[in-house]
Image (spheres, rainbow, N blue to C red):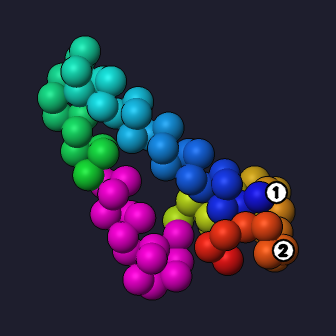
Amino acid sequence: MMNRCIRAIAGSFVLISVALAVYVNINWLWFTVFVGVNLIQSSITKWCLMETILKKLGVKDSSSKADCCS
């Protein structure tokens, strides 16, 4: 469940920031850069800020084989 939530949030952030860049101000693309850098950092360090936030909000981490990248 946790991996699906993180992917959905990251994808939503990217799409929202691109829409804001197109319709509001091009500088919103820096938010897209931040999301991309955070994804790369989490793949290297195995630590994700969004995972920490979701755990504090009570989202359970499923350790089943159904999650592809566990």
- Residue 65, located in which quarter of the rendered image? bottom right
Which secondary structure, mark 2? loop
Q: In 3D space, how far apart are the residues under numbered discs 2 and 1 (Cα atoms)?
A: 18 Å
Q: Which residue is mark 2?
A: 64
Please provide percent x and percent y for residue 45.
Answer: 45, 84
Q: Is residue 56 visible?
A: no
Magenta-drawn segment: 34-48
Find residue 58 and name its label: 1
Q: Residue at x 30, y 45 (%)?
A: 32
Q: Quadrant of the N terminus?
A: bottom right
Please provide percent x and percent y for residue 41.
Answer: 38, 74
Q: Residues within 10 Å of mark 1 (few under 14, many from 20)?
A: few
Looking at the picture, which amino acid does disc 1 mark? Gly
Q: Is residue 22 above or below residue 41?
A: above
Q: Residue at x 82, y 57 (%)?
A: 58
Q: Main secondary structure of the magenta part?
A: helix
